[in-house]
Amino acid sequence: MNLKKYLVRALHRLQKGPGYTYKELLVWYCDNTNTHGPKRIIKEGPKKKLIWFFLTLLFASLVFWQWGILINTYLSYNVTSSLSIGFKTMKFPAVTVCNANPFKYSEVKPLLKELDRLIEAALERILQPTPGNRSENVSSPLDLRLWNQIPLVLIDEHDKDNPVILDIFETNQTVGGNETAASNQIDIGNETAGDNQNSGGNKTTTHEGSNNCTYRNFTSAAQAVTEWYILQSTSILSKVPLHERIRMGYQAEDMILACLYGAEPCNYKNFTQIYHPDHGNCYIFNWGMDEEALNSSNPGAEFGLKLILDISQQDYIPYLSSAAGARLMLHQQKSFPFLKDQGIYAMAGTETSIGVLVDELERMGYPYSDCTMNGSDVPVKNLYSQYNTSYSIQACLRSCFQNHMVEICGCGHYMFPLPEGVKYCNNEDNPGWAYCYSSLRSSIKQRQICIDSCKETCNDTQYKMTISMADWPSEASEDWIFHILSYERDMSTNVTLDRNGIIKLNIYFQEYNYRTISESAATTIVWLLSSLGGQFGFWMGGSVLCLIEFGEIIIDSLWITIINVIGWCKGLKQKRARVRYPDVPPTVSELVEAHTNLGFQHEAVGALPRDEVLPPEPGTPPPNYDSLRVQPIDVLSLDSNME
């Protein structure tokens, strides 16, 4: 009870200034605030009061509207990009070189023998579609099992209304109890031709899958044959162990003939070997896995990396690699090289000079951009982590695709690393893998899922290249150069090298100037506060102190509300007491008067003579004067209770 009285008195003291009602508080605020407008509302005449009330309400609404726009702009977390140029000694990039041909044909030929015979016969029939012009080899019949799984169909569209489906292999053989796809290919060709709106001519279509069908149209038989051969060779090579595939590829000592970094000689032992599914054995210089990355002492061609490579073009697989040369890529240390996306070709018989400029990208993290520092917050399992390489967006996208293929198709694609406990797809164990792979690759939904799941790296280094080429060696010097290089490689006095297999590379920094493209927040908390204050001051002539005054009136309103609630509760309590005791309790003055009167009556009765006292009526008890005495009343306690 004492605590309640203390709180009530404290509220009374706090409300001593503004008043005890909301109206008094509002009038007090308008009269004492530093904000322009409210003072004029209470001091002007009736008409001006209305005008100033309308203007104050209008400009207050404008302030809140502008504040909403500013806060929304701040919460959008926009960034601005700035470009700065610096000068420093830089690390030489990691250089990955590969052969455009993944395997030596002499090593892999036994595995691809039946496939080569099949594609040669198909090419002959494509070039000579008339049965009478074909040269059939009856002594060695073709194994059509590979063909029946993924056949090629030639579509003649000279007459668009009546396209002609030409089955490349017209045969009545059966393989494994299944009929050849001659009649089915005609249906497939009709369905494909009906959806194609290209101009007249011959078209080759690839049909994939055994039970399910998917179609890929090509305007040239060269494209169709290459894609078909890649699919079939992928199925065959996926069953070959990794160490065998490495053995069938180009070895470092055979491919890297000469190496020079700055003024220091180097050789194939300074390169790190990795196996790349697209290009076979690849070799990385200055990868930084086992040793510290090399710094470039000076810019210019004399201080860069010089290589002489032998790509052995005469040992290329004829139907797998239609391009000849070396595939190379510049990238950061400890990052995996994705040559198919970011690599460049160096042509045989040329000296290729590559001048390098460095761009450093610095992105802001969450909430300004959805980037990652090391990929730990990306929901996709990075399959390239088995190479101990850093995270990249390319690694994430390929890992996402491989994970989806394992989940949907039940096996992994040969071109990507495998999750633990999963095998590569092949035609024998997974007959419908080609259909599943093609459907998944063309699925927009799958690609969007991977794009949404993967994130860019916050910090990245890009190498901008300026490429120039010249014939090398010249006709005047090719004789002695080929003699020396042949002797150094094979210890032979005969020339074993030629212009079609030799490549010279010069890789160097053009200059030590590097560009840094960094992001910074377009809106900061300082910008937000200054903008909010500027709008408030412009429209209302207010400041931070005016906001404090507004907060003060809110607190005072709360105090008044609390006082009113307490008064309401006390009134409710008294109302309930009146219902319980309907008689009106006597006041203090009435109790004092009754006490005085009773005392006077007692003295008067005691003053009468005994003989004048009237006798009581028979049967009535004698009066007890002690019961008429009134107890003394604590007036102070009554006053406190009434309060």
Image (cartoon, rainbow, N blue to C red):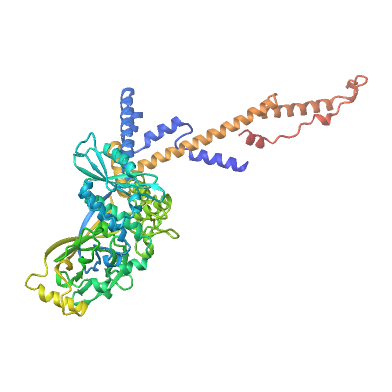
Q: Residue 418, how many percent across, how many down?
A: 39, 59
Q: Residue 290, how many percent across, how many down?
A: 33, 73
Determine the residue located farthest toward the left in the rendered image.
476
**Residue 4: quadrant of the picture:** top right
**Residue 428: quadrant of the picture:** bottom left
The quadrant the C terminus occupies is top right
Examine the rendering and report whether any part of residue 302 can be seen: yes
**Residue 377: quadrant of the picture:** bottom left
Q: Looking at the image, which residue is at 20% across and 80% down?
A: 491
Determine the residue located farthest toward the top in the rendered image.
617
The quadrant the N terminus occupies is top right
Q: Is residue 109 left or right of residue 484?
A: right
Q: Is residue 622 left or right of residue 169?
A: right
Query: Toward the viewer: 114 or 239?
Result: 114
Q: Is residue 18 left or right of residue 91?
A: right
Counting the numbered discs, the total is 0
Query: Toward the viewer: 443 or 640?
Result: 443
Q: Looking at the image, which residue is at 63% across and 33% down?
A: 642
Q: Residue 558, how many percent across, how many down?
A: 48, 37
Determine the residue located farthest toward the right in the rendered image.
618
Examine the rendering and report whether any part of residue 541 can be seen: no
Q: Is residue 622 left or right of residue 628?
A: right
Query: Toward the viewer: 402 or 437?
Result: 437
Q: Looking at the image, which residue is at 37% across and 63% down?
A: 240
Vertical relation: 450 (above or below) 480: above
Q: Residue 25, how many percent across, how many down?
A: 44, 33
Query: Toward the viewer: 299 or 325?
Result: 325
Q: Looking at the image, which residue is at 30% across and 70% down?
A: 272
